[in-house]
Amino acid sequence: MTWRKKGTEHTGDCSRNSKVLRQRRAEVPNQGEMAAMADLSKDRGLVGNRKLEEQIGMLQKEPSQEMLAVVLTTVRRRMKEHGQMIVPVEADASGFLRVQIMQIEDGEKWLAVYTGFEEQMMGGQSIQSTFLSDIGQLLNMALQEDSVEGLLINPWNRSLRLSKNLIRIILGEG
């Protein structure tokens, strides 16, 4: 097939061109892929935490041993994927950064972490500094710190308290 366009001659196979067009359409990401790509632009270590947030929300709505097992399995999977969480830090009087420990209503102290920036901002507190840490490191830190009961994921919304016993289960120690 031959056609002319403003003084130039083009030759081509229409069936081949439509095949290329179909391939290009197939390469366009769907909404889920686009959401994942948007998460990538935020921080790669946090990608995948949205699933954990959803499962924690389901556990809050319908608490059961089965749903708890699903959530713990997801935490373990994210740990093996080298997933990360946001850790708030505070400067002490001497200028050293300390991981923020949160005291809840009953007086217990927990190491507070967040699955994403949206969860972090829900508390309304102005957290001056944060860093990202590997989930496995956070679990081990909570186990080793005598002054805390465990890890408190998302204290403000889709919240989950991982006691030291649950942490041992996640790590395969209990």
Image (tube, rainbow, N blue to C red):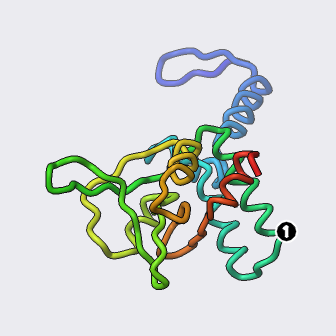
Residue ID at (77%, 23%)? 16
Measured as percent of width and height from the top left, residue 75 is found at 67, 53
Front in this rendered view, residue 118 or 79? 79
Which amino acid, by three-letter code, is at mark 1? Glu
Q: Is residue 36 above or below residue 112?
A: above
Q: Is residue 90 visible?
A: yes
Name the residue: 14% across, 50% down: 94
Q: Is residue 43 above or below residue 157?
A: above
Relative to 132, 95 lies left or right: left
Give the residue at the far front of this rendering: 146
Q: Quadrant of residue 50?
A: bottom right
Is residue 147 left or right of 56 when viewed as pictured? Answer: left
Figure quadrant of residue 166:
bottom right
Residue 72: x and y, percent? 73, 58
Badge 1: how crowded within 10 Å, few (<14), some, or many (20+)?
few
- Residue 119 lies, in percent from the top left, at 46, 66
- Percent x, y for residue 85? 50, 51
- Report the residue that reaches farthest toward the left: 94
Residue at 52 percent across and 54 percent down: it is 142
Viewer-proximal residue among 95 and 34: 95
Disc 1 secondary structure class:
helix
Q: Is residue 37 visible?
A: no
Q: Which residue is label 1 attached to?
A: 66
